[in-house]
Image (cartoon, rainbow, N blue to C red):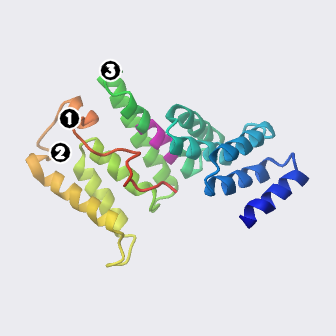
Amino acid sequence: MEAEKKFEEAVKLNKKDAELRRHYAEALWARGKHREALEQLNESAKRSDGTDGSLEISFAEKYLSMGDIQTAYRHADQAVRCNPKEFKAWALRGKATWCLAEQQLGQVSDEETAKAFDQARDDYYRALSLSPNNRSVLPELAMLQMRRNEPEYALATWQNLQELYQPGTEPPDVLQGKAAAHLAARSEGRGMKNERRGVDDIIIGRSSTYSPLAPNSSPLF
């Protein structure tokens, strides 16, 4: 509450400061004042030159949270263009792409869906190339790999994440994710070298329960 008041007073004194408005928006959002937060972000955008990657990231995060995936993707894509060395931009675009692919299942061709899942995976890979041991991006990638019916890759990703923690300090979600991937990799003879499945099984995985916006999904940031 106090921080919010200070930001409000500062904004009144510095109405043209775009970055200040963005920070004010974050404070408002944290207090559940989503409409007011978006208003401040829009005001910040009016005062920006269109190359502020941090502003685009903030927009993308908010719209993803609200379920407006198309708008979230647009801002995440712009964030990547503004600052291609920012891992958050790539991770957000990966998540938005994944969400769009889920929304469009049955509405577009299998080939288009496969390309969307490939782009989401590649964006996560790019994010990790910029922040290799990121404890927020790795779970997202592992869940996407499970969604793609690639438990062997998911198992390796969970293992990499687990190694970032001291033994006995791993979060339950990490251990549960690793266990689920291990069981999936062993079941039904899913060996990558022994089997090749159709697009529906590997890419779309219609029977999978994994979702980028599931309540128990690990947050990006």
Q: Is residue 81 left or right of residue 16?
A: left
Amino acid under disc 1: Asp
Q: Nearer the viewer, mark 2 or mark 1?
A: 1
**Is disc 2 in contact with disc 3, using a CB cutoff of under 8 Å?**
no
Q: Nearer the viewer, mark 2 or mark 3?
A: 3
Amino acid under disc 3: Ser
* Tag 3 residue: 109
- Find numbered disc 3 in the image and state the secondary structure of the residue it sits on: loop
Whether the magenta-drawn stretch holds residue 93 is answered as: yes
- Find numbered disc 1 in the image and state the secondary structure of the residue it sits on: helix
Whether the magenta-drawn stretch holds residue 137 is answered as: no
Say the numbered circle drawn on residue 156: none
Q: Position of residue 214 (x, y in %)?
A: 37, 48
Q: CA distance from mark 2 to mark 3?
A: 25 Å
Which quadrant does the N terminus fall into? bottom right
Q: Could you tell which of marks 2 and 3 lies nearer the N-terminus?
A: 3
Q: CA distance from mark 2 to mark 1?
A: 13 Å
Amino acid under disc 2: Met
Say the numbered circle drawn on residue 201: 1
Q: Position of residue 93 (x, y in %)?
A: 51, 41
Q: Position of residue 55 (x, y in %)?
A: 68, 45
Q: Which residues are magenta?
A: 91-98
Res 155 seen here = yes
Q: CA distance from mark 3 to mark 1?
A: 14 Å
Q: Main secondary structure of the magenta part?
A: helix
Q: Could you tell which of marks 2 and 1 lies nearer the N-terminus?
A: 2
**Is disc 3 in contact with disc 1, using a CB cutoff of under 8 Å?**
no
Instruction: Look at 35% across and 21% down and name the residue there.
Output: 107
Mark 1: few/some/many CA within 10 Å (<14, 14-19, 20+): some
* Tag 2 residue: 192
Mark 3: few/some/many CA within 10 Å (<14, 14-19, 20+): few
